Amino acid sequence: MALATGTKAPDFTLVTKGAEGPELFTLSEHIGKSNIVLLFVPMAFTGGCTTEFCSVTNELDEYTQLDATVIGISGDNPFAQAEWAEKEGIKLTLLSDYEHKTTAAYDVAYESFLPDANLIMGGVPKRSAFVIDKEGVIQYSEAQEHPKDMPDFDKIKETLKGLA
């Protein structure tokens, strides 16, 4: 079960692929600058994750108007994420949770990813969404059990409107 609303968002430092190479992104350095939407997805280059992040990319201006920064997190390495973003036109910051520590801290890890297909890949992030306010408190929390189910982006936007 994902961390509940009203919980202080766990801090983390993850790697992203910057223009000059790998860069670190620390959540606490961004708290207070804008609200933050954290979107966890299972894997780069998959249909559902690509659809989600391309859709969010198309709505980035709307999130900016709602005073929110959108961050994507998966367990893929930052170089694969960068290739994925370039291939698909994904414009949000993608963070690599390669060791699945942040996924575990937000309590959104599968024990076994797609067990019906006999894929035993523990630690893979569930498709999840968190809205973190400028005080660092989770104001919206959602984790999908099935990887094809999308977050409720209308509720995410309503939450952001309430924080303005």
Image (cartoon, rainbow, N blue to C red):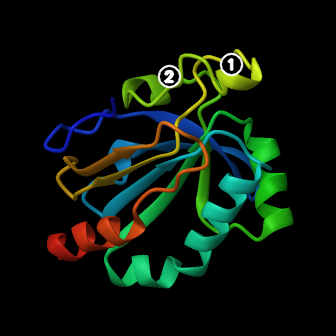
Compared to residue 71, the image places residue 56 above or below, namely below
Measuring from the top left, give residue 124's x and y in whole percent.
Answer: 61, 28
In which image quadrant can residue 95 be found? top right
> Of helix, strand and loop, which one carries label 1?
loop
First-in-chain label (1 vs 2): 2
**Amino acid marked by disc 1:** Met
Name the foreground residue: 114 vs 86: 114
Q: Disc 2 on helix, strand or loop? A: helix
Up the image or down, 135 lies above or below 86; here it is above
- Asked if 55 appears above or below 45 in the picture, the reply is below
| Residue farthest toward the front in the current orientation of the protein | 116
Q: In the image shown, does 12 or 47 lie closer to the viewer? A: 47
Where residue 97 sits, quadrant-wise, is top right
Viewer-closest of 67 and 110: 110
x and y percentages locating residue 134 in the rendered image: 21, 58
> Does residue 81 appear to the left or right of 53 in the view shown?
right
Label 2 amino acid?
Lys
Residue under label 1, please give it.
121
Among the 4 quarters of the image, the one containing residue 76: top right
Query: Which residue corresponds to the image point at 32% horizontal and 79% vertical from the top-left?
Result: 66
Residue 101 is marked as: 2
Asked if residue 81 lies left or right of residue 30, the reply is right
Pointer 1 and pointer 2: residues touching (CB < 8 Å)? no
